[in-house]
Amino acid sequence: MRDAVKKQKIGIIGAGAMGCLHAVFFVKAGLDTFIYENDPAVVDSLREGIMVLSDKPETVSVRTSGDPAVIEECSTVFLFVKSHATDSAMKEAAHRIRNGAIVVSLQNGLGNVEKIREYVPAERIVFGTTSMGASKKDPRTLVPGGAGTIIIGGRNHSAVRTVFGILVHSSLNVTMTDDPETAIWKKAIVNAGINPLGAILGLPNGKLVEIPEILKLQELIVAEAVSAAAAHGIQAGSDEMIGLTRDVCRKTSVNICSMLQDIRAGRKTEIESITGEILKAAANHGLPAPVNESVYLLVRALENRGAPD
């Protein structure tokens, strides 16, 4: 299996923090890796390599192009774009993804796989979650956020095993599941309990569990999300999810969540694919979710305000 993995050519769509983080792991594992990125400024900056700020700073060279043709020989393509860009990214790149190639989504939020299925057969899609974190100081400077776990699954077990082999070979912590949808929902619930509060209050994750009023809000948000998930057919205990959400806050205490990073940069957030999708599920089953609706509206207001002065 190891020899088969070494022959793989890996494509990455999106040169954001997570795309660059995984590219670094793949390159250092000796895998041919190519990034497609549609922002010319980012492509230009990465010609000098990805500068990784860690205990031992290093520069890792990854072939990056603004032409989606760069991924057409890749046997496995990882999609690392924001959830609101999934459809446009697939529209740009789908005709360059070779027939039979596996497409992998480890994106935040709900609804990404459904969008990918409009362009790629379900049997070729592997999807799941990652608790790995990273941020960027500038277009080429990557700040890893520590170790995490990847959970993957999909309809085609052979495709899942192939992706599993790539990730293990790249020294990433990965497990396989027969129920990746539940894993995605659980991560969405955790994100719903962290990201909007961090974005609204301007606080790192750890601070969210130090203030009693925030803890109460977080509890209400998670409870509403768990009810919406249950109505959707996803079983996740409220106590379990509240505990998991707070555990993530503590383990990533200094982390500035991606939603707060986006608000500070005046960018569109992933509120629609996280809280927005939870609200849709609640509405479809006639369930009230007033706290989630409130934080959703507040984040949207911050988005529409634009970058702070």
Image (cartoon, rainbow, N blue to C red):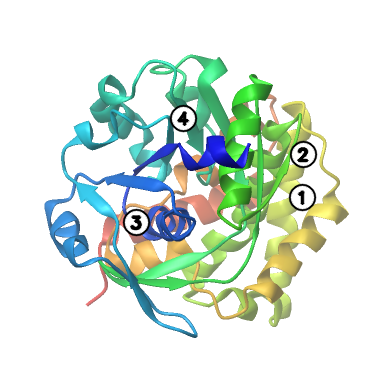
Q: Amino acid at mark 3?
A: Gly
Q: Are marks 1 and 2 in contact (CB under 8 Å)?
A: yes
Q: Earlier in the sequence, mark 2 or mark 3?
A: 3
At a point 50% along the width and 51% down the height, the residue shown is 296
The residue that mark 2 highlights is 227
Q: Secondary structure at mark 2?
A: helix
Query: How far apart are the alpha carbons under marks 2 and 4?
Result: 31 Å
Which of the 4 quarters of the picture holds residue 162?
top right
Q: Amino acid at mark 4?
A: Val
Q: Secondary structure at mark 4?
A: strand
The quadrant in which the C terminus is found is: bottom left
The residue that mark 3 highlights is 16
The residue that mark 1 highlights is 223
In the image, which is nearer the foreground, mark 4 or mark 1? 4
Instruction: Name the one closer to the observer, 84 or 196.
Output: 84
Figure label count: 4
Residue 116 in the image: above or below residue 35: above
Residue 253 in the image: above or below residue 227: below
At a point 37% along the width and 46% down the height, the residue shown is 32
Q: Give the class, few, some or many, for how many residues have Cα within 10 Å of label 1's Cα (few <14, many ≥20).
A: many
x, y percent for residue 61: 29, 62
State left or right for residue 228 relative to residue 74.
Answer: right
State left or right for residue 76 relative to residue 88.
Answer: right
Residue 103 seen in the current view:
yes
At a point 58% along the width and 47% down the height, the residue shown is 167
Query: How far apart are the alpha carbons under marks 3 and 4?
Result: 18 Å
Q: Give the class, few, some or many, for how many residues have Cα within 10 Å of label 2's Cα (few <14, many ≥20).
A: many
The residue that mark 4 highlights is 103
Residue 168 in the image: above or below residue 277: below
